[in-house]
Image: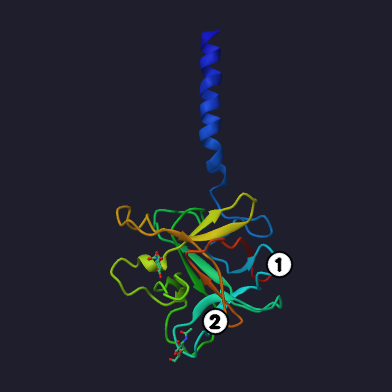
Amino acid sequence: MWMKFLASLILLVWLSTATPSLAQYVIDTNGEQVDNDEEYYIKPAITDNGGRFTLINRNETCPLYVGLENTDLPLGYPVKFTHFAVNIQDEDIGVNRDLKVEFKEVSSTCVQSTEWRVGENETRSGRRPIITGQDDSAGLYGNYFRIVETESAGIYNFQWCPTELCSTCGFVCSSAGILRENGKILFALDAATPLPVVFQKKDD
Ligand SMILES: *[C@@H]1O[C@H](CO)[C@@H](O)[C@H](O)[C@H]1NC(C)=O
Ligand SMILES: *[C@@H]1O[C@H](CO)[C@@H](O)[C@H](O)[C@H]1NC(C)=O
């Protein structure tokens, strides 16, 4: 009797600790795991927030900013994800993991790479826009983002909190949301409301 009770107790504890790790991979709009070999369009999960993710020419200067199309037309650029942790053997992209996000198939006159990068805190908005280019600091911390789950399956937020790269750095971690400016939709950290997004595999 005691053993049986103990066994159910262990099962209960195992279940309650094991359940969250079931959702360890990012799922696309087809319900399939997001893969590091494929390209994906990022889109808001809710309409009226803008269209697909794209590069924004904010001010006729380089680098370009990460933002959203102003239209639901199938424009924008797909992205590819690359984990920081080289010990992640499989191709499936995990939630809460530090990863690079890079726009693909971009034709632009800017020489910067099309990797996402955290920009400088701006006085006007009090927010850090997400720009493109390689972080030129030694740690490369500015180039790693995370995909985190929301309460809805298949819907995610982007965060910047690269603790896999440095667990003692004391980053000002933050979620990203939209920042509207002169009819343009930028994507920036320090959002009061993080933008819920979905991932649509290219060529579907
Ligand atoms: C755009 O560039 C002009 C001239 O360099 C500058 O005065 C203005 O503040 C810039 N705007 C933004 C949003 O950076
Ligand atoms: C950005 O600047 C604003 C003031 O302009 C400040 O309140 C905020 O804490 C700063 N954010 C970061 C991440 O440093």
**Which sits in the foreground, 45 or 122?**
122
* CB of mark 2 near ligand 1 (< 8 Å): no
Density class for disc 1 (Cα within 10 Å; few <14, some 14-19, many ≥20) is few
Which residue carries the number 1 mark? Answer: 47
- Circle 2 sits in a helix, a strand or a loop, which is it? strand
Do tag 2 and tag 1 residues touch (Cβ < 8 Å)?
Answer: no
Give the residue type that dot 1 points to: Thr
Q: Is residue 28 above or below residue 58?
A: above
Looking at the picture, the colour scheme in use is rainbow
Instruction: Report the side of 61 relative to 185 (left or right).
Output: left
Instruction: Report the side of 120 relative to 94 (left or right).
Output: left
Q: Quadrant of residue 74?
A: bottom right
Q: Is residue 115 above or below residue 154?
A: below
**Which sits in the foreground, 58 or 84?**
58
**Which quadrant is the N terminus positioned in?**
top right
- Residue at 49%, 54% in the rendered image: 90
Q: Position of residue 153 (x, y in %)?
A: 64, 51
- Residue at 63%, 68% in the rendered image: 43
* Mark 2 or 1, nearer chain start: 1
Which residue carries the number 2 mark? Answer: 56
**Which quadrant is the C terminus positioned in?**
bottom right
- Circle 1 sits in a helix, a strand or a loop, which is it? loop
| Residue farthest top in this picture | 1
Give the residue type that dot 2 points to: Ile
- Residue at 54%, 41% in the rendered image: 20
- Residue at 63%, 59% in the rendered image: 28
Density class for disc 2 (Cα within 10 Å; few <14, some 14-19, many ≥20) is many
* CB of mark 1 near ligand 1 (< 8 Å): no
